[in-house]
């Protein structure tokens, strides 16, 4: 899994010889308490709620193109995203990876193990607020294919060739809660009809160094339990595209060829009464 994920020691060595922009996705208080020297804090990578209307997608792209440009990304630098640890930020560093991929950025890494791994390796931390030189961020439309909107998701219902994969926590999957932020945060509880459940935590495992992504073969084995092979088109969703970004990274690294995300996810789907849902406790994890 070396293409996207990078270890703390490898990252430290690489940053000595290459132009790297570190992006800290944690909340501002955590950033202020200590971060990788030179890192820029963009917590909105995690908090921003996107919609999949044409206007919503345009706003998402323009907002983050400006944020990443202000952080110093011009296309020539490697973007490295991190959170505290791989299971403590609901996939927020991976959400940054997904957004950068959507914008077509050419060189992206995620720090495997997050800031915890950096600190455990004895590498330095700083409390100094970074002041990067703003650059012009290049949007490449080629990245747009990894995003699906509500209409595309709706058209996939009943198409047995596409695996709609719900990666939310169990209480959301069984329609007991509408979100990670409270049971009634959204107006409806349930699932997109025909979805298969592959909880995002299953992409990772505990190690002596902390939570890490599973190996390629382990992730493919997890996918096989819900009928997903490397050739299966996969449409992912969660609540707002953070946990699903964690799974997106895992599946791409494991060699699943066609992985896309419904970035509006349950936050958007549940608020449109015209879109169908399944509710109650499902009888099976797989469709």
Image: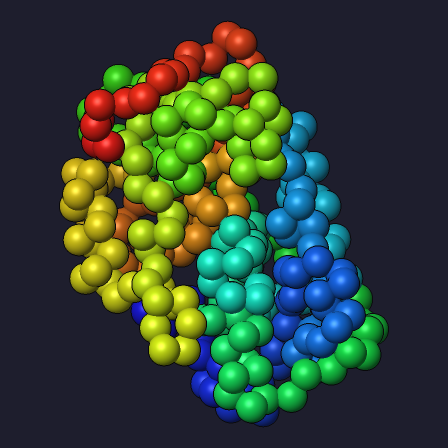
Residue 13, placed above or below residue 168: below
Quarter occupied by residue 175: top left
- Percent of width and height locating residue 102: 52, 48
Residue 36, placed above or below residue 232: below
Q: Residue at x 52, y 46 (%)?
A: 242
**Is residue 81 shown to the viewer in this render?**
no
Image quarter where the C terminus lies is top left
Q: State left or right for residue 188 relative to residue 237.
A: right
Residue 15, placed above or below residue 184: below
- Percent of width and height locating residue 43: 69, 55
- Percent of width and height locating residue 15: 57, 85
**Is residue 219 shown to the viewer in this render?**
yes
The answer to which of 214 and 160 lies nearer the viewer is 214
The answer to which of 28 and 259 lies nearer the viewer is 28
Colour scheme employed for the rendering of this structure: rainbow
Q: Residue at x 62, y 49 (%)?
A: 46
Residue 275, placed above or below residue 53: above
């Amino acid at each position: 899994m070396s293409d996207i994920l990078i270890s703390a020691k490898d990252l430290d060595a690489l940053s000595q010889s290459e132009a790297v922009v570190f992006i800290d996705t944690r909340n501002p208080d955590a950033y202020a308490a200590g971060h990788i020297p030179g890192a820029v804090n963009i917590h909105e990578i995690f908090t921003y709620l996107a919609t999949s209307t044409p206007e919503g997608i345009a706003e998402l792209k323009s907002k983050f193109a400006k944020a990443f440009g202000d952080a110093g990304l011009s296309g020539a630098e490697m973007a490295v995203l991190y959170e505290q640890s791989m299971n403590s930020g609901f996939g927020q560093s991976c959400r940054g990876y997904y957004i950068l991929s959507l914008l077509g950025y050419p060189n992206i890494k995620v720090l495997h193990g997050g800031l915890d791994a950096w600190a455990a390796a004895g590498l330095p931390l700083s409390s100094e607020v970074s002041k990067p030189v703003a650059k012009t961020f290049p949007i490449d439309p080629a990245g747009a294919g990894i995003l699906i909107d509500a209409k595309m998701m709706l058209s996939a219902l009943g198409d047995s060739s596409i695996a709609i994969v719900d990666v939310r926590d169990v209480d959301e999957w069984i329609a007991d809660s509408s979100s990670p932020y409270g049971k009634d945060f959204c107006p409806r509880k349930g699932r997109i009809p025909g979805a298969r459940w592959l909880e995002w935590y299953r992409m990772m495992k505990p190690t002596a160094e902390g939570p890490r992504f599973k190996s390629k073969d382990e992730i493919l084995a997890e996918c096989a339990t819900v009928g997903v092979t490397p050739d299966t088109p996969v449409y992912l969703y969660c609540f707002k595209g953070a946990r699903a970004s964690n799974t997106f990274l895992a599946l791409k690294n494991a060699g699943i060829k066609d992985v896309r995300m419904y970035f509006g996810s349950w936050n958007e789907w549940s608020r449109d009464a015209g879109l169908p849902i399944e509710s109650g406790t499902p009888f099976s994890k797989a469709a």
